[in-house]
Image: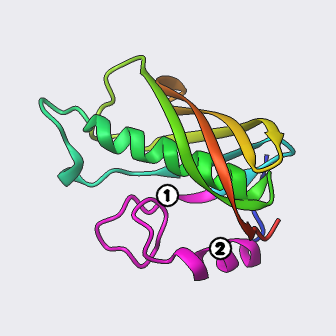
Amino acid sequence: MTPVDPATLAAVRAEFGHCFGCGPDNPIGLQIDRFERNDTSVRAWFTPRTDYRGFHGILHGGIVATALDEILAWTAILIGGSAAVTAKLDLQFRNPPPADHDYELVGTLVEQRGRRFMLTGECRVDGRVVAQANGLFLATGATGPV
């Protein structure tokens, strides 16, 4: 994978600067960053705030779900060429997500038919999958800066 062009990131973030998932202007958001891509997948990282803990040193599952939703949306933008909204998101938690670690996210475009994007994603800690997602996203009609 190669880093996403900074101009491309800036163009997307100009539209979504306050996004809870990726917005650099949202002080309480996940601030997912360091985007990379290839022909079918997008990868990014985030470090959760201590406020996002569930119990006993575990990251809240809703934060993991949000992060997976976000990487799938970025995959639609950067690989599929269109902003898209979540129509369906199926999650499988595989391992307890630790609160005090950096997280790697990977989204992959499986199929694109018209406005429909079928995507898969993984949330990893130190290479270990903590959660997986399958998503159906619908293009909004806004063209992404690919």
Above or below, 131 against 2 in this view is above
Which amino acid, by three-letter code, is at mark 1? Answer: Ile
**Residue type, numbered disc 2:** Val
Residue visible at 75% across and 78% down?
Answer: 7
In the picture shown, does residue 101 fall above or below 8?
A: above
Give the farthest residue toward the left: 56
Q: Which mark is residue 144?
A: none
Magenta-drawn segment: 6-34
Judge the density around disc 2: few (<14), some (14-19), many (≥20) Cα neighbours within 10 Å.
Answer: some
Q: Is residue 62 left or right of residue 66?
A: left
Nearer to the camera, 47 or 22 = 22
Disc 1: which residue: 32
Q: Name the residue nearer the viewer: 74 or 143.
A: 143
Q: Is residue 134 above or below residue 85?
A: above
The residue identified by callout 2 is 12
C-alpha span from label 2 to label 1: 13 Å
Label 2 vs label 1, nearer the camera: 2
- Mark with earlier residue (2, 1): 2
